[in-house]
Image: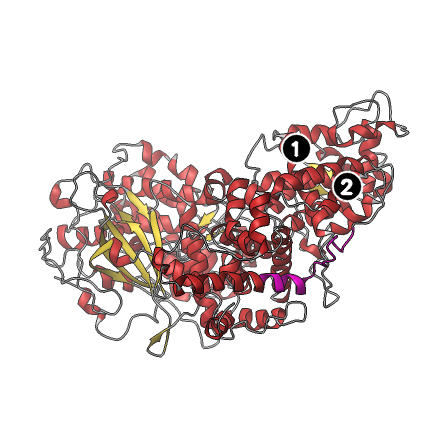
Amino acid sequence: MATDFWASSHHKRWVVDRASVKRARAEDLLYVDDPEYLDFLAIFFANCISRLGKKLQLRQRVIATATVFFRRFYLKNSYCETDPFLVIAACCYVAAKAEESPLPIKNVVSDARFVFSQEMYGIKTFPSDTSKLAEMEFYLVDDLECDLTIFHPYRTLMTLCYKEGSNVGAGGGADGNIEAGELGAGIDDGQRYWGTGEGRLELHEGALQMAWFIINDTYRSDLCLLYPPHLIAIAAIYLALVLHTPTRTLIQSQTAPGSSSASATGSACSGPTTANPTPAPVRRSSRQASNASSSSSKKNQQHHQPQDFVGFMASLNVSMPLIATIAQEIISLYTLWDRYKEDSPTSTSSLDSSAKGSFTSNQGRHNSPFTTGTKRSATGTNTSRSGSVTTNVSASAGTGSHAGTPMDIVREDGVEITPVFLVKVLLKMREGKWTDLAARSGLGEGGDGGGNGPRAVNKILGRTQAAG
Amino acid sequence: MLDEWSSSLLQTDPMRAYRMKRDAAHRTVQSKYTILGFISSGTYGRVYKAQSRDDVDTGGDGKAGKIHAIKKFKPDKEGDVVAYTGISQSAIREIALNREISHENVVALKEVILEDKSIYMVFDYAEHDFLQVIHHYSQTLRAQIPPAVLKSLTYQLLNGLLYLHTTHILHRDLKPANILITSSGTVKIGDLGLARLTHSPLQPLFAGDKVVVTIWYRAPELLMGAKHYNKAIDCWAVGCVLAELASLRPIFKGEEAKLDSKKNVPFQRDQLIKIFEVLGTPDEREWPGIKDMPEYNNMKRLDHFQNHLQEWCNSRIRSSSGFDFLRQLFAYDPENRLPCREALQHKWFQDEPKPTANAFQTLAAHQIPPHRRITQDDAPSMMPMPQVQPHPQGSGKPGSSASFASMTQLSGGGGGGYQTSGGRKKARMG
């Protein structure tokens, strides 16, 4: 099981299409003022899980598992008829057990009460009674259909790549020296579960770290429901190759002499290059080289035979258009996330282990083929994603030449998307749902219990229907 | 907008609508299954025999629903009141692993029902188990298990274990009571309550469970205090199970030294002596890592023994390839112990008689152990059920599959806790 993703419950039951994800939000759409808020809520909830997870000192993989549980739960349920904060606490509690690092239930309750009562959330009603959380755990495990084994992209990342200068195969777990963000922590060896299983990419430490952080970030969207983890990992590697400046420079110099097929850097060929017209034989497997240079640094990397990055990506035997799609969705997540304002109450922010910063800083860089190219696609994906792109995104993305323009945090309607605001949105949705429930049972025709949906009376409904 | 009552309810119990929706959609254990009787109990809870009420499950004859074993986890109690206290780690483990696996030689989980603060795992039913076979031969037939049956059972056990190991699962509690056999002679490994994934663990294996594997089946590296161990511990247990099938009694029947008051794991002196008496005292030549074991100095103080496995096998296995097979499963050095894949290729399985897909194929009817006895639950609060029906398979042989429930407890190691004083003996029959 652990090696055979294809036989797993994850593969068989929990990779869903976008229509299912959209359908899952249908009821919430009835009660939300602006459908886009739901996308912000997806980021907000992931940050909540991350904050609670950090407080509970959960490892990154456990937090990731909790987040997947949360997304799966809301494939079947609505925000407006549940208490997402209780669900989050239950997800962390179950994930800790599922990943073999259990926590006492009372610790989860007290930490959840502490975290969620902070100013940014202002939730004072989190139940202090552990049996409430235990009861939620029952419903959660049931809604998860008892499928508690989750595959994550981290493992693929570490089987595909290794840190420059490290021993091939060490995978990071062996040396016990774990970095911030837990790069490589606890990763055992293990075969890739698709393709030939051969070849690994030696990455600059910064690039590997960035790919890891990008994976962290993907949990703020529905990507973990939509795509198998190995594809998400490859998309993260792809983005890291482009976003990590030294690595990008290296690739650009390699591919400059007119190899237009190199999609990632294809438009970069105008740049000056010192690369050989007949490139030195590139190595597909970096095994020999890494052994030769145990103390490699950024500088002497230049003296190596260059790795064939593009060839490596091509050799992975996965659909590159699909990887590009995932990469675009990741970028559209950053675009959205950039408009969401969450101040960390402490210095240990949940965003420490994010690649968001590198993405944003890269946007300003001129001469980066990535910036203009991807921003355009970002809007494209965003549109297809939920049909909820506000016009100012399209506008700013459309002016790709002014890549340095920062995204506006304040929307055109003057609303600032913050945790406090989103909590209000959530409470309002819940209240709307309850009003309808109460009205229906009050009218005495509550027996039918569904079908026609609630009669929402606010302005949203019209807008939603018009949009859909 | 909301009236005051609803509004306060929304504040205090925002999940109410969700629960009502879920509870309305829930199908209860009672509505899906008829409980036929009580099978056994352990530290984890209790096992019942049940029949499906679902039409889809009636297998075409339109009458009898499929038979299942329902494992009900012991609910946590605060005083006398059953309360939600969180699902135990072992239940989470067993559920999570079972949802991922599927193999001919591993018991299949049909579904899990979470109801009324209890967890019910519904498994395919298996009529027999290794312990019951051993008892049938030692008590009723007073004869050895025929070589063809011995080989078939071992082969299928290894086949199921190979599957678990290739999916990076350590069983960690293989013993005769946990290895089931269907009425058509197919071996099914059961009880993954102690099993664990070894792939990319976030915690070392040692951290979670200080003691694994019932003492008689526990590998020497565990007895020597190893913190790191691997699949080889299951292969050792297979050797012990094979030896027990061959001799109809546990080969290393040591006394377990109990945890002290500080929960320190004591030196398992008696169990090691029982092993050394048959296999001889290990030395650094055959197990180089032994001198680094935490209990090495304790072990050095024990008497010295010679290897007598050959003699042990002469009267019990009576096959040179069988002796070699057991010798390799009992390699002291975990690195040298026979792994499942190689074990399945061993010459013993090539020699006549060869293993059969139906382990009972070569047996006459009376040689097959009687059907599992079920009794009325003596803890009626656990699961409501009808009066026990007259037993259709009148096995009737005194002491035949007797006291299977109590035997399960006997070899249940690590246990305690659950069995209340007295009462449980009722599960025994005669």
Label disc, if present, on residue A397 of the rendered structure: 2
Say which amino acid is labelled 2: Ala
Kindly report the distance in space between the C-alpha atoms of the residues bearing marks 1 and 2. Answer: 37 Å
Which residue lies at the image location 78% right of the left edge and 28% below the top edge?
A: A266
Residue B311 visible in image: no
Label 1 vs 2, first from the N-terminus: 1
* Screen quadrant of the C terminus of chain B: bottom left
The colour scheme of the drawn protein is secondary structure
Locate residue A130 relative to residue A154 in the image: left or right: left
Position of residue B271 measured from the top left corner of the image (x, y, whole percent): 38, 62
Position of residue A99 measured from the top left corner of the image (x, y, whole percent): 53, 56
Residue A290 visible in image: yes
Q: Secondary structure at mark 1?
A: loop
Residue ranking furthest to the top? A278
Query: Is A37 inside the magenta-drawn segment?
Result: no
* Front residue of this view, candidates A331 and A112: A331
Tag 1: Cα neighbours inside 10 Å, few (<14), some, or many (≥20)? some
* Front residue of this view, candidates B403 and B20: B20
Query: Is A425 inside the magenta-drawn segment?
Result: yes
**Residue A414, picture quadrant:** bottom right
Q: Which residues are magenta?
A: A408-426
Q: Secondary structure at mark 2?
A: helix
Position of residue A140 measured from the top left corner of the image (x, y, whole percent): 46, 58
Say which amino acid is labelled 1: Gly
Residue under numbered circle 1:
A199
**Depth-wise, is mark 1 or mark 2 nearer the camera?**
2
Tag 2: Cα neighbours inside 10 Å, few (<14), some, or many (≥20)? many
